[in-house]
Amino acid sequence: MQLLTEYRHLADNFGWVANILVVIGMILLTKKQRSGFIYNILGHIVYLVQSLMLMMSSLLAIDIILIGVNIFGFLKWKQTKILCSSFQQKIKKHIDLEIDRQLKIRRK
């Protein structure tokens, strides 16, 4: 019985570590920091270990899903930034062309 109690304390400690990692991850994501996904992934891996320790299949299932969602978000973030950068370059080029056109009209 004492082993089970010690085991539960260890699982509880894992939960606190996971909570801290996920909160840090969420704060970073609200500040538009891509590293927030890494903290979330690490936090959910710790939750996953906790769910295995406590034999909680529902927690295990949601952590597997959330790890996948955060990996997807991390990978998608890069694509989104590339697309935004490309779009910004096209807009800048269009603005530059329009400025040149306007200057040529004024010179005439």
Image: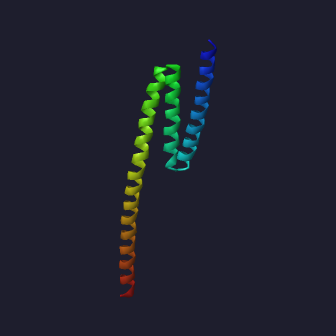
Residue 67 quadrant: top left
55 to 99, vertically: above or below: above
- Name the spot of residue 94 as percent of width and height, x first: 36, 69
Q: Nearer the viewer, residue 34 or 107?
A: 34
- Name the spot of residue 3 as percent of width and height, x first: 61, 16
Does residue 21 appear to the left or right of 106 in the view shown?
right
Residue in view at x 52 percent, y 30 percent: 47
100 to 12, vertically: above or below: below
Query: Looking at the image, what colour scheme do you see?
Result: rainbow
- Name the spot of residue 68 as percent of width and height, x first: 41, 36
The N terminus lies in quadrant: top right
- Name the spot of residue 86 as percent of width and height, x first: 37, 61
The C terminus lies in quadrant: bottom left
76 to 20, vertically: above or below: below
State the residue lying farthest toward the bottom. Answer: 108
Residue in view at x 64 percent, y 14 percent: 2
Residue in view at x 39 percent, y 70 percent: 95
The mark tally for this picture is 0
